[in-house]
Amino acid sequence: MNLILFGPPGAGKGTQAELLQKRYALAKLSTGDMLRSAPAALAGLVKGYMQKGELVPDDVIIAIIKARIDEKDCAKGFILDGFPRTKAQAEALEGMLHAEGKHLDYVIELAVDDKKLVERITGRFSCAKCGAGYHDIFKQPRKLGICDECAATEFTRREDDKVETVAKRLEVYHRQTAPILDYYRAQAGQGALAYIHVNGMLPIEEVTGVIDAALQAEKKIAENG
Ligand code: AMP
């Protein structure tokens, strides 16, 4: 099962990708995470774009995904989180999957209002040691200042989660990324994949429940022909 989690920054793609990864034993391919932990040469190349909230060039990100999809753990299926973000990336993905006899099964859109997104993104922080995610309003550590997962006391905030950069990231999403939803809706119309629209404003567990139910329902339809 190969799927895309689609939606603006802060829609909850990373959170849902992590839950789905565990539930369905899929590889999780988060391009943002890959870029943030990239080797120095690549990190230097993409840093400027990321700090400004702009997209890194298509050829760079396509090469990264192409190499990653070829890795062994992707054979059983993968979740794309943060890719594709442009029409050129969507087309390149289709080409690389086709060349390997693979295809996309699902595109899951998490829809969230821009106002809510700004509140969600600007409040996020994470454990500097294990990366566990928290939020100023929605999810403080159980003991203030101490990570629930590893008891570390240092936390970090993403540089591009500042309010000015978030505005740019949302603008980029609406201008460059959202239009490719039409591309996938058209493919769903032709029966090439299943398109699942989810209200990403719901609490995390409810979003997971809706995705799960939709995946199960689609599986049944596929099984019954
Ligand atoms: P994310 O963690 O998904 O919000 O991504 C953080 C940043 O990484 C984005 O604002 C872009 O600068 C860059 N990035 C991540 N994925 C892509 C992609 N598919 N295409 C271009 N840039 C990307």
Image: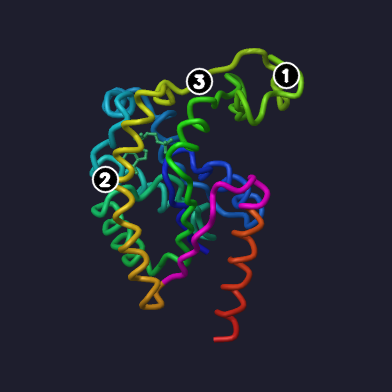
Please name which of the two marks, 1 or 3, marks the residue nearer to the observer.
3
Q: Quadrant of residue 107?
A: bottom left
Q: Going by the image, does 113 lie left or right of 89?
A: right
Residue 151, numbered label: 1
Q: Going by the image, does 72 lie left or right of 91?
A: right
Q: Give whichever of discs 1 and 3 has the lower sequence position.
A: 1
Q: Are marks 2 and 1 in contact (CB under 8 Å)?
A: no
Q: Which quadrant of the render holds ligand 1?
A: top left
Give the residues drawn in magenta, as a range: 193-207
Q: Is residue 222 magenta?
A: no
Amino acid identity at mark 2: Arg
- In the rendered image, residue 66, in percent from the top left (x then y), is placed at 34, 50
Closer-to-camera residue (116/96) = 116
Q: Quadrant of residue 18?
A: top right
Q: Going by the image, does 155 lie left or right of 53?
A: right
Please name which of the two marks, 2 or 3, marks the residue nearer to the observer.
2
Q: Are marks 2 and 3 in contact (CB under 8 Å)?
A: no
